[in-house]
Image (cartoon, rainbow, N blue to C red):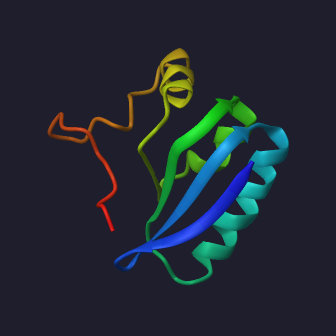
Amino acid sequence: MALDVEWDGPRPVVVVSGELDLVGGDLLAAVLDHVRSSRAELVAVDLSGVTFVDTHGLAPAMQPDVVLVDPSRVVCRLLSLMGLPDPADGPDGRPRRRRAG
């Protein structure tokens, strides 16, 4: 698994790729805590590069101050199995994606 922090304007974006499991979840939680210390009110987590995910890995991203963007098919499948809406669908029904940049 790999994590990278980018900035989309004033909003931090944590980019996750690879397998997001128990160990990866611990690392993601630590990175999110670090990013939150920058006084970011909202953190985006880009999950487009996730090839495997389990509930332990995804749990740190399921916080009220985190927005999931560009979820991969495996992430959407897990969210569906958990009975949660697809984060790619914004409130207006359009996909929520990161801006190119």
* Left or right, residue 9 beside residue 68: left
Q: Estimate the x, y position of residue 21 in percent, counting from the top left.
A: 77, 37
Image quarter in which the C terminus is found: bottom left
Instruction: Judge by depth and name the residue closer to the eye, 80 or 64.
Output: 80
Pick the front one: 62 or 69:
69
| Most distant residue in the front direction | 101
Provide residue 33's location: percent of width, then percent of height.
Answer: 68, 69
Name which residue lies at 51% across and 26% down: 79
In screen coordinates, is 49 left or right of 71? right
Left or right: where 88 falls relative to 51:
left
Question: Which residue lies most toward the top here?
Answer: 81
Residue 98 x %, y % = 34, 56
Taking depth in this image into account, of 3 and 39 the one nearest to the observer is 3
Q: Is residue 85 above or below residue 41?
A: above
Q: Quadrant of residue 8?
A: bottom left
Picture mark count:
0
Q: Compared with residue 8, is residue 45 higher up or lower down, i.e. above or below? A: above
Q: Check the image and name the residue furthest to the right.
A: 23
Residue at image coords 55%, 51%: 63
Q: Return the residue found at the far bottom.
A: 38
Query: Residue at point 66% right, 42% down?
Result: 59
Asked if 65 appears above or below 20 in the picture, the reply is below
Which residue corresponds to the image point at 67% horizontal and 59% vertical from the top-left? 3
